[in-house]
């Protein structure tokens, strides 16, 4: 198949999820003069914060520069994990650090429970499949590291994880590409845009004001709280929450300097014959791998397509350019898909932090929930909710992600010029690992 033949005749550059729900700003809510809490960013974090505030009878207004859900929250892979990748950078043997990481894992596991609870309580019809995940080992060394982590994940993140040797991996994934892997039964996948819509609907039922097309342009501290200037009006609020993740801009330079936006890319195949789809994912798990240049994928909620994502390029690039790269990654893993065409390709921003951990907290008087590090369906829902509970004064105990301040770096001013170089370095490290280990 040459490069052009991979594209279906109806190919579009648009998230496939938007066929079911496209972020929209039909009725533009007026910007109210006052509110208790102003939230900047209407993704999972901002909308969950507003929902939890409403449940605690606190008035909140959410502002988005575009349509609610315009950011990562309706573009992602929909893979829901509960702490598998949290704290992977920590190797310290200091008891206090070990305790801290275990607390992070426990709270990450809570984020998974929260998603399940919200889906049930708010009756969100979003194709939730609690079918677990499989993380493919890129090399023998990674499989060994996974083996060392399983007990910790089970004890602290209640992951129901176990190692799958290479000889058995075909029971989990229709591919011989990996050197075995780790199955995590407490995981699954959903339709990210319908999940977002469900949260938005829950806010609407509680009369939360969501102001679309209202980019926040200036924030000023006042005697009573904050003045929020937007392109469509001005609001005074007692508290403010920054929930802009990979879209954090110049209006909050202190946060822009602390999160690194990175593009992530996805493609969707055309509808596949039933037996071909089942051959890829016999038990409908979500997939990811242990490469530094990560890939992640899953079947669509109806089981008919493969949605395949990854960091095909590290900078922000046209999805038309990254689609053939993802297609190659996909057919390397599933040669049986050679000849299948793709109907959609798209991109969105994730936000990395210097310590590779998500954070909530307060900086310069502003609450924030930021830094999904690529995994935020559950985590950003959770951090938004926890931020709201903190503001409402009803948090039972401090969240483990609300502690260590969101770190910056002396050499980073908010311009991620170095990202393509980091991407090249990671590719070389991956290549070496695969060959030597
Ligand atoms: C392609 C892709 C695949 C992913 N796959 C997965 C996955 O499979 N599983 C998983 O767990 N996570 C995944 N993620 C991560 C996940 O999507 C994000 O962590 C999550 O959506 C972040 O939610 P959020 O509410 O923090 O931010 P977002 O949803 O990104 O929302 C931020 C909002 O802030 C708004 N904004 C910015 N500046 C302003 C301003 N000045 N005024 C008003 N509004 C402003 C933006 O318009 C945007 O709507 C993926 C992300 C991407 C992009």
Image (cartoon, grey):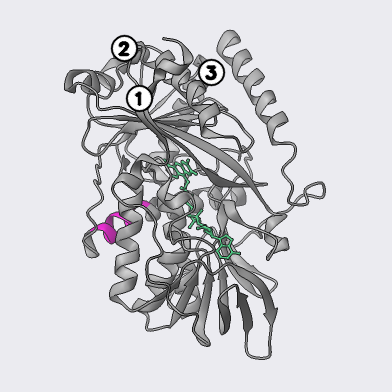
Determine the residue positioned at 60% across, 35% down: 317
In percent of the image, x 70 and y 72: which residue is there?
364
Q: How many marks?
A: 3
Pair 2/3: label in front: 2
The residue indicated by pointer 1 is: 8
**9 versus 27 height, above or below:** above
Secondary structure beneath dot 3 equals helix
Residue beneath the point at 60% across and 9% down: 436
Task: Tell me the quadrant of the picture where the C terminus can be found.
Answer: top right
CB at disc 2 and ligand 1 closer than 8 Å: no
Name the residue located 33 percent from the left edge and 32 percent from the top edge.
298
- Compute the Cα span from label 2 to label 3: 27 Å
* Circle 2 SS class: helix
Q: Position of residue 414 (x, y in %)?
A: 73, 51
Residue 92: image x %, image y %? 64, 40
Q: Secondary structure at mark 1?
A: strand
- Relative to residue 17, is residue 107 depicted above or below? below
Q: Quadrant of residue 94?
A: top right
Q: What residue did someone put label 2 on?
A: 336
Lower sequence index among marks 2 and 3: 3
Task: Give the label on residue 246, or none.
Answer: none
Give the magenta-colored segment's residue range: 112-119
Q: Report x, y in % for residue 194.
A: 30, 52
Residue occupying the far right of the picture: 410
Q: Nearer the viewer, mark 3 or mark 1?
A: 1
Question: In the image, is residue 222 above or below residue 252?
Answer: below
Residue matched to label 3? 141
Is residue 91 visible from the viewing direction of this image?
yes
Q: Nearer the viewer, residue 346 or 420?
A: 346
In the figure, is residue 431 to the left or right of 82? right
Earlier residue among tags 3 and 1: 1
């Amino acid at each position: 198949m040459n490069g052009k033949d991979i594209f279906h005749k109806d190919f579009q550059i648009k998230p496939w999820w938007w066929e079911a729900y496209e972020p929209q700003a039909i009725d533009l809510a007026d910007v109210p003069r006052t509110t208790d809490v102003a939230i900047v960013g209407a993704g999972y974090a901002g909308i969950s914060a507003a929902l939890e505030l409403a449940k605690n009878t606190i008035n909140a207004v959410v502002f988005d520069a575009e349509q609610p859900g315009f950011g990562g929250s309706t573009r992602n892979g929909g893979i829901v994990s509960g702490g598998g990748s949290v704290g992977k950078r920590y190797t310290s043997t200091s008891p206090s650090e070990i305790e801290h990481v275990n607390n992070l894992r426990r709270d990450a596991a809570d984020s998974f429970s929260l998603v399940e609870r919200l889906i049930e309580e708010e009756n969100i019809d979003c194709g939730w499949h609690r079918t677990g995940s499989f993380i493919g080992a890129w090399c023998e060394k990674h499989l060994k590291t996974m083996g060392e982590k399983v007990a910790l994940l089970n004890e602290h993140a209640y992951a129901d994880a176990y190692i799958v040797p290479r000889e058995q991996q075909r029971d989990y994934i229709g591919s011989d590409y990996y050197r075995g892997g780790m199955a995590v039964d407490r995981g699954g996948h959903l339709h990210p845009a319908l999940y977002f819509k469900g949260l938005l609907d829950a806010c609407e039922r509680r009369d939360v004001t969501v102001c679309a097309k209202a980019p926040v342009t200036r924030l000023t501290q006042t005697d009573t709280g904050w003045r929020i200037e937007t392109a469509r009006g001005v609001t005074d609020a007692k508290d403010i929450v920054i929930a802009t993740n990979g879209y954090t801009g110049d209006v909050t330079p202190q946060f822009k300097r602390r999160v690194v936006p990175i593009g992530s890319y996805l493609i969707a195949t055309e509808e596949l014959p039933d037996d071909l789809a089942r051959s890829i994912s016999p038990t409908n798990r979500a997939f990811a791998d242990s490469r530094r240049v990560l890939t992640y994928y899953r079947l669509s909620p109806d089981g008919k397509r493969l949605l395949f994502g990854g960091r095909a390029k590290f900078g922000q690039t046209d999805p038309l350019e990254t689609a053939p790269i993802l297609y190659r990654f996909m057919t390397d893993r599933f040669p049986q898909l050679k000849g299948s065409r793709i109907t959609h390709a798209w991109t969105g921003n994730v936000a990395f932090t210097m310590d590779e951990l998500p954070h909530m907290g307060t900086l310069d008087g502003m609450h924030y929930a930021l830094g999904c590090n690529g995994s935020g369906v559950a985590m950003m829902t959770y951090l938004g909710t926890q931020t709201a509970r903190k503001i409402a004064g009803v948090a039972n105990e401090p969240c483990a992600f609300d502690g260590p301040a969101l770190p910056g770096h002396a050499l980073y001013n908010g311009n991620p010029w170095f990202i393509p170089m980091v991407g090249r370095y990671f590719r070389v490290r991956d290549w070496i690992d695969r060959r030597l280990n």
